[in-house]
Image (spheres, grey):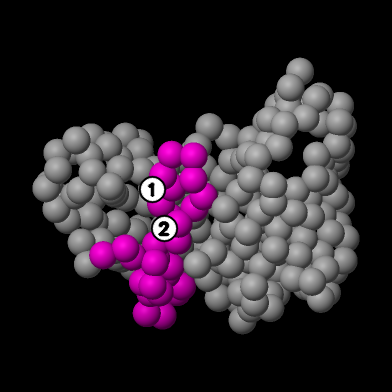
C-alpha cells in the first residue's frame, strides 16, 4: 500500500508568514509523530499523536508551533510567524503501535525561511 | 534531552571492513530500534530488538542489546559504499510510549 506522504516537499516562505505542513499517514496506523531535523543534526521530537488520546506536545519549541490530527488520520503542523531558525526538514512518521512496531517515515518537507 | 546517544558521531571505513556503532539510553525500554537515513530525508527502519532479546541478525546487520548497561550496538559486516548514511537508534522509554531518537552516527564507507 501507499506509504507516508508529506506535502509540500519544499516550502520557501518569508519571515513572519504562517506555514502549514501536511502529513498523510499509512492507513490504520494509530501513532503519528512529527520531528524536525536541522542540517546535519539528529531528529528533534516535536509532537506525538496516539489514537484518540491527547497529543504529547512536549517537544514543540514554542507556542508558534501547533499540530492537529483530524479523524485520527491526516495531520497538519502549523508554524505561525515563522523565524529563520525554523528552517529545517520536518519529518512525519506513523506506526501501527508506538514502541512495538517500526515507524514509517515520509520524505519530509524542507522549510526555508528567508 | 535525547533518550539515546550514539557513539561515535562519525565513522569512516574502507569498503569491506566492519562498522560498529553504539547507542546508550537512559531509562528502561521495551524495544530498541535502528534506522538508516540517506540524504537527510526520511528514515528507513533496519531492525527492532526487544528488551528480552540479547542479539538479533538481519542480513549483514547484527544488533546486540545489554539492558543492564542500557546500551546497544549495531554491527555492519563487509561494508559497502551504499552503506554510507546516518544511523540512529530509537527507544520507547518504557510503557510503549512515544519513540525518541538518538543523535546519530554518520558512517562513510570509502570505495
Measured Cα–Cα span from mark 1 to mark 2: 7 Å
Q: Which residues are magenta?
A: A35-62
Q: Looking at the picture, does residue B15 appear above or below residue B90?
A: above
Q: Write down the chain letter for disc 1.
A: A
Q: Position of residue B69 (x, y in %)?
A: 79, 71
Q: Going by the picture, which residue comes out furthest to the top?
A: B111
Secondary structure type for disc 2: strand
Whether the residues at callouts 1 and 2 have beta carbons within 8 Å, the answer is yes
Q: Mark 2, residues whose alpha carbon is within 10 Å: few (<14), some, or many (≥20)?
A: many
- Find residue B1 and report its horizontal and vertical position in percent: 50, 67
For the residue pair B6 and A53, the one nearer the viewer reads as B6
Front position in the image: B103 or A14: B103
Say if residue B104 shows up in the picture: yes
Of the 4 image quadrants, the one containing the C terminus of chain A is: top left
| Image point (81%, 76%), residue name | B68
Instruction: Determine if the magenta segment contains residue A54.
Output: yes
Subunit ID for the residue under disc 2: A
Q: Which residue is mark 2?
A: A34
Where is residue A19 drawn, in percent x and y?
20, 48
Could you tell me which residue is drawn at 86 percent across and 26 percent down? B16
Q: Secondary structure at mark 1?
A: strand
What is the number of the mark on residue A90? Answer: 1
Amino acid at each position: 500500500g501507499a506509504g507516508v506522504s508529506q506535502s509540500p516537499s519544499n516550502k520557501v516562505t518569508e519571515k513572519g508568514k504562517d506555514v502549514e505542513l501536511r502529513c498523510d499517514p499509512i492507513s490504520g496506523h494509530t501513532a503519528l509523530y512529527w520531528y524536525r531535523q536541522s542540517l546535519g543534526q539528529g531528529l528533534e521530537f516535536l509532537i506525538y499523536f496516539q489514537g484518540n488520546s491527547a497529543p504529547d506536545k512536549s517537544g514543540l519549541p514554542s507556542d508558534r508551533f501547533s499540530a492537529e490530527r483530524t479523524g485520527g488520520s491526516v495531520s497538519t503542523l502549523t508554524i505561525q510567524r515563522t523565524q529563520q531558525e525554523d528552517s529545517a526538514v520536518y519529518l512525519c512518521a506513523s506506526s501501527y503501535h508506538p514502541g512495538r512496531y517500526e515507524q514509517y517515515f515520509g520524505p519530509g518537507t524542507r522549510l526555508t525561511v528567508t | 534531552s535525547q533518550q539515546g546517544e550514539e557513539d561515535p558521531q562519525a565513522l569512516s571505513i574502507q569498503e569491506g571492513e566492519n562498522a560498529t556503532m553504539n547507542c546508550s539510553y537512559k531509562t528502561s525500554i521495551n524495544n530498541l530500534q535502528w534506522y538508516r537515513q540517506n540524504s537527510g530525508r526520511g528514515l528507513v527502519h533496519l531492525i527492532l530488538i526487544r528488551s528480552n532479546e540479547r542479539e538479533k541478525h538481519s542480513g549483514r546487520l547484527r544488533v546486540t542489546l545489554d539492558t543492564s548497561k542500557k546500551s546497544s550496538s549495531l554491527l555492519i559486516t563487509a561494508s559497502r559504499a551504499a552503506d554510507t548514511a546516518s544511523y540512529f537508534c530509537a527507544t520507547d522509554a518504557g510503557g510503549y510510549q512515544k519513540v525518541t531518537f538518538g543523535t546519530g552516527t554518520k558512517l562513510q564507507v570509502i570505495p
